[in-house]
Image: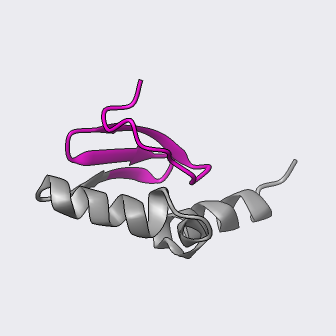
Amino acid sequence: MHYSRRTWICPYFKYDEKRRVHCEAGVIRMPDEQAMKDLADAYCGNLPGWEKCPLARCMSAFYERKPG
């Protein structure tokens, strides 16, 4: 189960902790829970916001150029 019990939209999301989001691109550490909520509301848990996240864009580009 995820720490926050929120709905995560980004396909690269793995799991979350108190002030951290783990995704395929790495770990994002936020200074407090409000900053974590703001991040999730803007990107990780937002449709279509996740597509604007720089990390998600890098991962999408990676999968587009990856052979096979």
Q: Report the residue at 31% width, 32% height from top.
A: 3
Q: Is residue 8 magenta?
A: yes
Q: Report the residue at 47% width, 58% height from top.
A: 44
Q: In the image, 36: left or right of 64?
A: left
Asked if 8 appears above or below 64 in the picture, the reply is above
Q: Residue 4: x and y, percent?
A: 32, 38
In the image as oriented, which residue stretches furthest toward the top?
A: 1
Q: Residue 28: x and y, percent?
A: 30, 55
Asked if 20 appears above or below 60 in the picture, the reply is above
Q: Report the residue at 57% width, 54% height from top.
A: 10
Q: In the image, 24: left or right of 34?
A: right
Asked if 10 appears above or below 13 in the picture, the reply is below
In the image as oriented, which residue stretches furthest toward the right?
A: 68
Q: Residue 52: x and y, percent?
A: 55, 76
Q: Is residue 67 magenta?
A: no
Q: Report the residue at 12% width, 56% height from top.
A: 32
- The residue segment tinted magenta is 1-27
Q: Quadrant of the N terminus?
A: top left
Q: In the image, 56: left or right of 35?
A: right
Q: How many marks?
A: 0
